[in-house]
Image: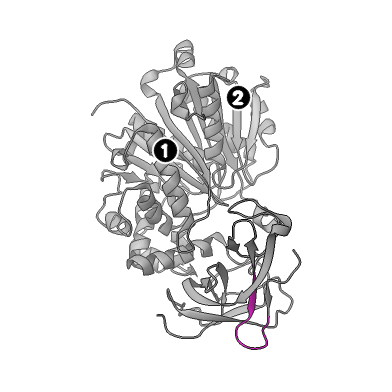
Amino acid sequence: MSMPLVEAAASGPAQIRIGRCGACGHRYFPFQPLGCERCGAHGATQSPILVPARGSVLAAVGVWKHRSPGIEAPFQVADVLLDAGVKVRALIDADPCRPATLGTPVSGIVVQAGDTPVAPLRFTVVGERA
Amino acid sequence: MSRTLNDLRPVHVVGIGLHPYQAPGTQPYTELGLTAVRAALDDAGIGWPEVETAFVGTALVAAASGRPMLRHLGATGTSITHVENASASGSSAFRQACLEVACGVAEVALAVGVDKPEMRPDGFSRAGVPDLLPGVVSPMTHFALLAQSYMERYGATPEQLAAVAVKNIGNAARNPCAQRRQPVTLAEVLDGKPLSGVLTRMQCCPVGEGAAAVIVASEDAIARLGIDLRRAVRVEASVSMSEGLYEPTAFPDAELTRLAVAGLLRQSGRKPADLDIVEVHDAFTVEELVYAEAIGLAAPGEAARAVAAGEFDIGGRCAVSPSGGLLGMGHPIGPTGVGQIVEIARQLRGEAGPRQHPNARVGLAHMLGLGSVCVAHLLSVDRQA
């Protein structure tokens, strides 16, 4: 449970730690051994897998008002469908006034986190939508 | 084999009451709740000693809030159960009240929702499961992402989303218990301060305080207590579901709604076209569009056009959120689901005054709670056109 959610890679995109259920094959994020949402298998049947933080945008928005600690508005947040088939919700390092559109390819890097609970992962746009 | 509500003995709403939804203030929750319960008892024409069981829907105000409130009606020893189901707390309280009467455990039951907006941590934040963005994605941003996805998928516009707020706040302006009482124009909605994505302030529900109460009773109790059967509203069906695993591109809350309402309609043998009144979880404008489609009131991507055409207006094909909905009437959390039942009962009785939908006979109440859970009810009257 204490394994980091993301890790830097020697080259290419960051790695995201997803989970895979050994009983039914379901893949999910984040990894946790509490139990598989599809079949209920738990504990050692659940395995962490590192997959590239690379995928395409399902939706992205600029956030203009935000009060919780850890990050100051404005910022851009997105739902990203990883190439590994798992959806994550993360920050996009881009102008909040120009949210990434559906299908835009993105890739994540590990950044300096600072004193914040927000994970040190930022996606950037790496091309045009297919 | 499990049974559904309409397999059991009939349950009727016989009393309704509200404390107006309002901005947070210093009034104790007990005053809010007692106002609503006393109004519901008066509406039913019965006394508190007739109520055998009470379900208190609350998510924020405090633990064990029922007895400190209800004892002021007389310490009759009635059963008190607290129901917490996030935004659907009141809906679940109502469901439990109906089920106890339907099962024969009680003849007369109370569902009361009461809350004051105290911020409490939710289950996800204490689940021990890490998150990339802990505390960053508020409900507003969650639904702004849904709005963006809906607009890109179906070509809907920010103006079409904002039109939902104009309609619902317009309805609320005719509701003396609503938190937002001033109609707004499309320009005023669109020109408001942007909060997240395309959502401006008026496209987000106000979270205030208030209370709502409903008395339900069996037909035996209605006869024994001399309750006016002509004002009774039948609870035809009840569904409670939680989110399943859906495709990554699905709108989870919409998919959950689609499955829950399909079950509700199946229980009652009804079709979407039978619905005269629908109160949905319109906490954010986009929600009314996606849930209207999930319920079957419009084809996918067509709800915005239906709003523009007035089909969801009071007097239209189906009045959606005639109370003002969460956007206009407000979303005090615990009371909201019970308040939907109050509005539907009022409409089906023909007692909704300036916001009466003509010839209303069938109504659907739909709430989602964080998680997500979905609780929906179908109510009807036999009155002929």
Picture coordinates of residue B20, whole percent (x, y): 50, 41
Colour scheme shown: one colour
Camera-side residue of B351 and A99: A99
Observer able to see residue A125: yes
- In the image as oriented, which residue stretches furthest toward the top? B224
Bin the neighbour count of mark 1 within 10 Å (Cα to Cα): few under 14, some 14-19, many 20 and up.
many
- In the image as oriented, which residue stretches furthest toward the front? A23
Magenta residues, start to end:
A8-18
Left or right, residue A36 beside residue B145: right
Residue that label 1 marks: B264
Q: Which of marks 2 and 1 is nearer the N terminus?
A: 2
Kindly identify the amino acid type of the residue bearing the numbered disc 2: Thr
Picture coordinates of residue B221, whole percent (x, y): 49, 15
Q: Is residue B326 above or below residue B275?
A: below
Mark 1 lies on a secondary structure that is helix
Camera-side residue of B107 and A3: A3
